[in-house]
Amino acid sequence: MYQAEPILVVAASLAMNKYSGGFWVFVLCAVSISGAFFSWAFYGEPSIVGSVFALFTCVPIIALERGALFPRLYARMAALSTPLYLIAMLIVTYILMYLGSALCRVLLGWIGYHTYESWQELAVLPASAMFSALGVSLVVSFVARVRELLGRDVFLSLLIGRYRKPIEEERVFLFIDLVGSTSFAQEFGDIRAQQFLSALFATFAEPVRRYLGAIDDYVGDAAIITWPMSRGIKDGNSVKCIFAILDLIEADQEKWIKDFGRVPQLRAALHGGPIITAEIGVDHHKITYFGDTVNTTARLETLCRTLDAPVLISSDLAGRLEFDSEIQPEFLGTHAVKGRGQTLGVMALKRAAYIPASTNFVH
């Protein structure tokens, strides 16, 4: 049986850590301000030189931890045991800080700022600068980790307390389920199945960000993606998202077969409508959604197997969307949905360019 290297799974998960331009603008601003504050604290006044030093020493560390700088190196370190990872991270972090500081001093010297008197001084990284860079990098990385754990929209909503009181709103939900996950686990084992799911969910990240959605939760072998109604129907974002995910999987068929012995096959359902959004919990806070819309989406996804259609959308939501010419909606009639108490119009979504991926095993 084929066994992929653990580093492949770690590297795949790093794809979820590469944030958009907005994240890096935040990083640059936060680091620059910290550098100016460092200059004020140690030299009596804030200065542009302090900001530049902070950028050269902090940003490479954050980029490494985010998987944007030397992703293969970081993937190898992340695959180590915790003690070895900490030692390796400290060594690499110091090297990056030293090189960043030295390069910054040389460049500033070329443009007339005398930040060192001798090459011996250039070779020494001041302890104050080192601890300051480490502190700022740790804080920014911690905030990024929390944001990553909760999700972009949830992080901001929890931060401002938007849902402390339940709010009625309209949202679009996309449920995506992996076909054949049980048989995969039986053949390859539970650990291998989890690695397969981790790589698959990492694939979702870029299309979800591109089409302005948010991954709300992972439930077993399924992912729940959501949009505020206006954002989900604008330009068909919610529909484009699922087909972008299918495109990515199809484009990497050979890699999937090489790494895991099969290409993921998905079932997906789209529905939208009114829900109640609220922040719940005491020790562990979570923003959750209540209402018939969520339940209907889940039950619509189960119809994919019955109707032999990989992508379904409710007629209610389809009526609020304008489909691209390449999307081919096909009305499949009305169907009773368990627990809904009434029938639901269902449409299959297809695209001429999409060919379902093969699920053949490679032994």
Image: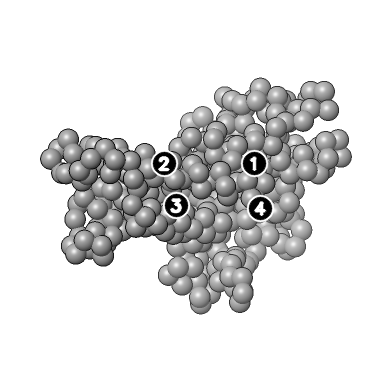
CB contact under 8 Å: marks 4 and 2: no
- Say whether disc 3 or disc 1 marks the residue closer to the N-terminus: 1
* Residue closer to the observer: 296 or 51: 51
Asked if residue 94 shows in the view, the reply is: yes
Q: What amino acid is found at the position of numbered circle 1 in the picture?
A: Ala
Question: What label does residue 96 carry, if any?
Answer: 2
Q: CA distance from mark 4 to mark 2?
A: 35 Å
Q: Amino acid at mark 3?
A: Arg
Question: Residue 349 location, x and y as percent?
Answer: 61, 37
Q: Secondary structure beneath disc 1?
A: loop
As drawn, the residue found furthest toward the right would be 186
Question: In the picture provided, is 66 more to the left or to the right than 58?
Answer: right
Query: Dot 3 corresponds to which residue?
Result: 231
Judged from the image, the secondary structure of the residue bearing numbered disc 4 is strand
Which residue lies under the disc numbered 4? 218
SS under mark 2: helix
